[in-house]
Image (cartoon, rainbow, N blue to C red):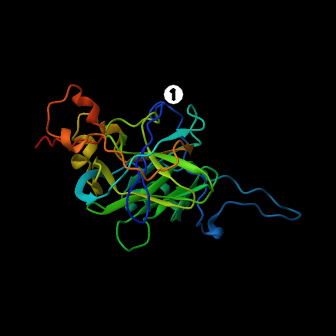
Amino acid sequence: MRKSIGSWWQFLLGLLVVAGLSACSMQPPVAAVAQDSASAPGASYGASAKMAAPAPKAAKAESTLGTQWGEGLESVTKVVRASRLTPDQPRFVGQMRYSDEASIRRALGQYAERQLNALLADGDVEMQIGSGQDRPPLRIFSSRGAQDYYVAGRAGERYELIYTNRSNRYYEVVATVDGLDVLTGQPGSVRNEGYLLRPGERLVIDGFRKNDREVAAFRFSNKERAYANNTPAGDARNVGMIGSALFEVRLDERDPDLPVDPVPAAQRGQPQAFPADGGRYAPPPQYRR
């Protein structure tokens, strides 16, 4: 597992579970913290009180955006060891869609509700979609009576996945963008390694990991330029999706700050008997034109 050097920590965990993100039943984030109480569904009470009718199910908003392999950002990690407490069952699995705001509003209509964060794992972890700048997080839209959540983005805009641990538990965060694991660039699965989120800490995932020291920034783009549409592991059907899986974990070592280099410096550039073992991170895109 890896730890980043900075104001927040990132970790990798190499552990096995039985279900993949594409195979499991996806559940959306639970109710958001920030909501307009006047727009929430409810009932009136009195002599002639009637329960409010449930809102009609909103139409699905088709994504008009993808996520491009952006500029390189410094992001240093270290490896630590940890074990999942329930290796065959994530504490939480959920997804969000993203598109431009006008498309989302057209699909959700009068039932669109805005929020700035979502609560995962019964509120243990707060999730936001950051703008990558000193600005408020991007808006998350939901629809009364529906179980879908949408993030409003704009082509060219950089964004981040921000997880804040509000509990005293240790969590592993396995994240996907457009169906691709943010660490490996391969199809998303909860079998994959993730980042460790310590109690009270804030984890920022700001790109596809290129190596131990750098990520390729997440940038909204048109769907044709999306990383998932320009790498052999991608699938165009998954463009426009952000996935999150959380596992509760325990640390297996006393000193999580101990750095571990998977390939010693003396061996870099030398012939290797098992070269595929070093390919744990995401390869760059291969644009068709």
* Residue farthest along the right direction in this orientation: 47
Q: Is residue 153 visible?
A: no
All told, the count of numbered labels is 1
For the N terminus, the image quarter is top left
Residue 27, position as x, y percentages in the image: 55, 42
Residue positioned 32% across, 56% down in the render: 76
Amino acid type, residue under disc 1 in the picture: Val
Q: Nearer the viewer, residue 224 or 122?
A: 122
Q: Nearer the viewer, residue 213 or 166?
A: 213
Q: Is residue 125 left or right of residue 133?
A: right
Read off the residue under disc 1: 18
Q: Is residue 248 left or right of residue 14?
A: right
Residue 55, position as x, y percentages in the image: 62, 53
The answer to whether residue 140 is above or below residue 238 is: below
The answer to whether residue 282 is above or below residue 144 is: above
Q: Secondary structure at mark 1?
A: loop
For the C terminus, the image quarter is top left
Q: Is residue 45 left or right of residue 262?
A: right
